[in-house]
Image (cartoon, rainbow, N blue to C red):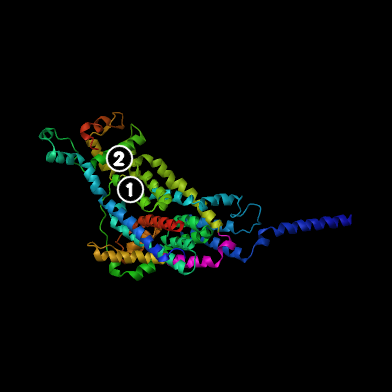
Amino acid sequence: MIGLRNGADSTLMEMFLDFFANTGFALADYRNFIMLAIGVLFIYLGIAKHYEPLLLVPIGFGILLGNIPVFKGLGLGIYESNSVLHYLYFGVTSGVYPPLIFMGIGAMTDFSTLLARPVLMLLGAAAQAGIFLTFLGALALGFAPNEAASIGIIGGADGPTAIFLTAKLARELIGPIAVAAYSYMALVPVIQPPIMRLLTTRQERLIRMEEPRQVSKRAKLIFPIIAVLLCCFIAPAALPLLGLLFLGNLLKEAVVTERLAQAARTSIIDSVTILLGMTVGASTQADVFLTGKSIGIFILGALSFCVATAAGLLFAKLMNLFLRTKINPLLGAAGVSAVPDSARVVQMVGQAEDSTNFLLMHAMAPNVCGVIGSAVGAGILWSFMMG
Amino acid sequence: MQHNGFSMAAVGITIVFTALVTLSLIISQLHKLLTFWDNRAAWKQKIFRMFGPQEEEAGPAPHVYHVPGSPESARQFCLLIQATGEPFSLPGLLRTAEACGIRHPYAKASRLIEEHLIIPDQKGFYVWNHAEYDRPAKRSR
């Protein structure tokens, strides 16, 4: 009897130990805790500091989900082919989510400031220099060309574009690149102002912009059709992103499709943002994420962002040498496509010098052009790497 | 490295610039093209006067709106009314027009009432005057 009880006790103990060996507490190592802390930090920044909460909260929570240690083989981890998270992650790796987000952005964006002053498009183009200079920097640091292209696109300051290109070129880097891109987008109000003050004089920051001319509804209706045809004929690889961006915009401008535009700018973009943010966060498993490469990506990403901002500012100053009516060079910083954060930063820095100078509306022109420019840039890099 | 990074970067930024500069050039001329399209009847007449037979000139001058933006307003509101249905209340129409981003909806609606394109249905609502809108003289819309 006693022997039997001892046997039962040992079996119970074995079962308990087996169970414990499979819990997160036994499987975790220090890297999991570092990532969990980063996840909590993202959630904190999103909720308490209001830094891009719509992105940082799902990404932060995804980081928590991806870094709870689980045993392999049960189909729980995002990299296990039969897991639920893996199926949701398919939208990222196949490049489905970013174009859907672009459709929502298109349905929200008013291109009238751009149509009123098309010359400001050049600022959006100039800021894309950050992408290509960082691409060179990454090559110099020894990254493979496909990885260098994915890192360079962080300078476009466009999360969906960065994820789309990385999914096509360097799938294993999606986690670090997406987190870097969204982190820097959230930090636009911190990163950009010092560069803007450094590269412009007070007189330049005080320049007032002319009132833009009125744009007819018909011009706004025709613009997405012309833009998609032109840009996709020049850079066909940008078609998935630009196609849906301009479709969303056409739905918005064609009054008769208001219901579809409403769906694109609310339910579709919101659902996709949740899935994208959560799965990208979950893809940052400690063993994949905490590597030397990730540190390189973060450094180059920051550099890329700074170079893009500086390129926009300097190009605006260059344009002023030739323009009769000067433009405020701060607008150049809005050429990075963090919509509308970088335009807001331009307004903030401009108003710090003159509280009656309103630059927001004008800054939206290079800002939305930055979205187009970075998508074209991504398409070009993709076609180069495939070629 | 198989490809030359410098050439890829140089070609890449050049293509981005080319795309956006071409787009900006086209959209900077867009309003001129639209104005030309709106006045195509006048241009046609001018061309007829220059090259066409003399009797073409004798015909009655077509009625053309002289209020800038009016044909476009009519088209916008016509589409809007088709989407919302008839009869409609004027405040409701104005609210929808504002929500759809139509500029100066009050002024435009007032103009359309003056032009008898929006007419009361005698029951407290309004309807679109299809007969007036489809009049051949105003087909330039």
Q: Distance of mark 2 from mark 1, alpha carbons?
A: 20 Å
Residue A271's label in the rendered image is: none
**Residue that label 1 marks:** A226
Residue B76's label in the rendered image is: 2
Q: Nearer the viewer, residue B12 or A277?
A: B12
Specify whether disc 2 shares its chain with disc 1: no
**Quadrant housing residue B46:** top left
Magenta includes A289? yes
Name the front one of labels 2 and 1.
Answer: 1
* Residue at image coords 85%, 55%: A5
Magenta includes A140? no
Query: Split into 4 quadrants, where in the image is the N terminus of chain A?
Result: bottom right
Identity of the amino acid at label 2?
Gln
Instruction: State left or right for residue A113 relative to residue A106.
Output: left
**Quadrant housing residue A284:** bottom right
Residue A165 rendering spot, x and y as whole percentages: 46, 56
Residue A237 rendering spot, x and y as whole percentages: 42, 52
* Part of the protein shown in magenta: A284-304
**Quadrant housing residue B64:** top left
* Residue at image coords 24%, 64%: A322
Could you tell me what secondary structure mostly forms the magenta stretch?
A: helix
